[in-house]
Amino acid sequence: MTTRKEGESPACLAGLIMDEKKHCHFCGALLTNKFVEGRIRKYCPDCREPIYENPVPATCIVVTDTACGIWLVKRNVDPKKGFWCLPGGFMELDETPEQAALRELQEETGLLGKIDMLMGITINPSPAYSSVLMAGYLVREFTGEPCAGDDASDIACFGLDRLPEIAFSSHRHFIRIYQSAYA
Ligand SMILES: [Zn+2]
């Protein structure tokens, strides 16, 4: 899964913990905390507006292979560096979720996939972005030779009965859906 790098402070990159927002992104004023619409929110006293914060959208893919199981990649970046996960990553501004999923698949595995179906949407807690909105897709047809790239240091096909520890709860969620409904 791609981690975003631009626009983050070195301290933020090192720990991958999101700095608490201090300034209004409209006027630059120092934010306060205020109870607005059911919860404590960041609030700009100059704009007299709450700062709404939302999950960051990302995608992942269960790539199935009739010969061996599902394809996973090993992460070479934090968070969860060294753990296996589904191919996937964050959406760019000009992409549909499907385009984002297939682009990340190609970057991380070298495979050109065809999306079979949307398996669902869930959230994943994130130290860097508080909350990630994760769309999970199923890919059963692909071309190309598996080759790890981008944020992946390794790629392997795992039988469903011998899966390694998976990095993210949202990815585990979609693997369970595949195992229970489509395998
Ligand atoms: Zn403001």
Image (cartoon, rainbow, N blue to C red):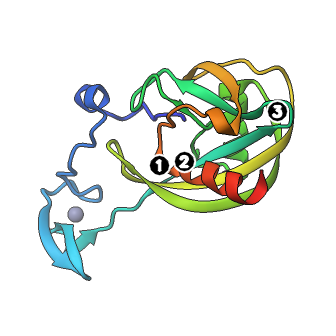
Residue type (three-letter) at the residue carrying disc 2: Arg
Secondary structure at badge 2 equals: helix
The label on residue 172 is: 2
The label on residue 169 is: 1
Q: Is residue 49 above or below residue 83?
A: below
Q: Is residue 30 above or below residue 63?
A: below
- What residue sits 66% from the left and 38% below the top? 161
What x and y, as percent, mark residue 162? 63, 32
Residue at the far front: name it.
161
What x and y, as percent, mark residue 10? 27, 25
Residue 155 in sight here? yes
Q: Nearer the viewer, residue 178 or 131?
A: 178
Residue type (three-letter) at the residue carrying disc 3: Leu
Q: Which residue is mark 3?
A: 112
The label on residue 91 is: none
Question: How far is disc 2 from disc 1 in space, using C-alphas?
Answer: 5 Å
Q: Nearer the viewer, mark 3 or mark 1?
A: 1
- What residue sits 55% from the left and 31% below the top? 164
Q: Nearer the viewer, mark 2 or mark 3?
A: 2
- What residue sits 40% from the left and 28% below the top? 78
Question: How far is disc 2 from disc 3 in space, using C-alphas?
Answer: 23 Å
Which of marks 1 and 3 precedes in the sequence?
3
Q: Quadrant of residue 69?
A: top right
Secondary structure at badge 3 equals: strand
* Image quarter (top left, top right, bottom left or bottom right) of the N terminus: top right
Q: Are marks 2 and 1 in contact (CB under 8 Å)?
A: yes
